[in-house]
Image: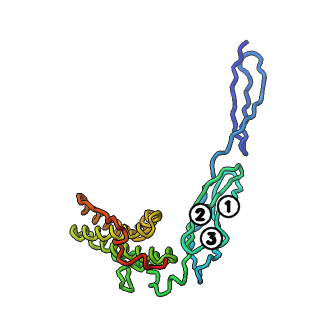
Amino acid sequence: MGRLLHFIVLVLGLGWLAIWPTACTQGNGDAATQNGTVQDTTPPVITAPAPVDASSPDGNPVPVAIGQPTATDLFGPVTFTNDAPAVFSVGSTLVTWTAMDANGNTANAFQAVSVSDDRSLSGLPPDPGPAGRATLEGIDSDNDGVRDDVQRWIAINYPSSEKTRMALKQLALTQQQFVLDSVDPVKSLNNAVQRGKAIDCLFYISPSDAPTIINEFKAITLNTYTRSKAYLQADHHLSGNVFSSDLDWKQSCNFDPDALPN
């Protein structure tokens, strides 16, 4: 006689799957139990510690307390590892944190650690903080044409290359005017030409790193909605214009980069 089987499926804790057939409704039935495994493939959700700013009094690498991440996962406990060095050099370091749950699933998060060279900060204006982002112009307390926050960023991130610092200062001056004159099409065009020369100068000094440096620089200088909007407005005035780059990038510098020691 035919048999009609009904199955009850239960998912038990710790990833076990059990299947039990119920009694047959027709004829004689046999009972059987089948076990299966449900594999956990969901990685933890990890949150890296907050970015850390530290300083070195003499420019040498220093130990930095970077804190601990947090994570959530269905199958704990979660363990953490990172690739942080024992000591951090002057500049920016990106620390990769890895979280692993009890079933071997992993997830990564990233933490920025910045170490400034106190020697390079000598004579610099103080950090303007939130007040430096309150207006389009920002704060330029020493009246050198470069915003204080940008001036500090250049000194902190490029303490070992005077050439790079000089090129970035040239770029900062032209970028600031490009943003401030964004409503004027003629000035926007002239400022764009000068900004292009500063970029050429940076490529002369550091051709392989220049694209990365420029992207980081834009993130620092256009760090508010108002500044980004002004930049886009000025850039819109350039539509339809043709720009050419000086074949001799060195001539684009407003200083002699070959005369500097580093």
Q: Residues within 10 Å of mark 2 (few under 14, many from 20)?
A: many
Residue 78 to residue 183: above or below:
above
Can residue 223 be seen here? The reply is no
Nearer the camera: disc 2 or disc 1: 1
State the image coordinates of residue 37 (x, y, percent, origin top left).
72, 38
Name the residue nearer the viewer: 7 or 39. 39
Residue 210, quarter of picture: bottom left
Q: Residues within 10 Å of mark 1 (few under 14, many from 20)?
A: few
Is residue 230 toward the left or the right of residue 257 in the image?
A: left
Which residue corresponds to the image point at 69% horizontal and 40% vertical from the top-left? 38
Q: CA separation, marks 3 and 2? A: 10 Å
Name the residue nearer the viewer: 178 or 196. 196
Which residue corresponds to the image point at 63% horizontal and 64% vertical from the top-left? 69
Q: How many labels does the image show?
A: 3
Q: Is mark 3 on a helix, strand or loop?
A: loop
Q: What residue type is labelled 3?
A: Ile
Q: CA separation, marks 2 and 1? A: 11 Å
Q: CA separation, marks 1 and 3? A: 12 Å
Q: Is mark 2 on a helix, strand or loop?
A: loop
First reached walking from the N terminus: tag 2 or tag 1: 2
First reached walking from the N terminus: tag 3 or tag 2: 2
Q: Residues within 10 Å of mark 3 (few under 14, many from 20)?
A: some
State the image coordinates of residue 230 (x, y, percent, origin top left).
31, 67
First reached walking from the N terminus: tag 1 or tag 3: 3
Q: Which residue does the numbered mark 1 point to in the structure image?
A: 81
Q: Which residue does the numbered mark 2 point to in the structure image?
A: 48
Name the residue nearer the viewer: 37 or 163. 163
Q: Which residue does the numbered mark 3 point to in the structure image?
A: 66
State the image coordinates of residue 129 (x, y, percent, origin top left).
45, 78
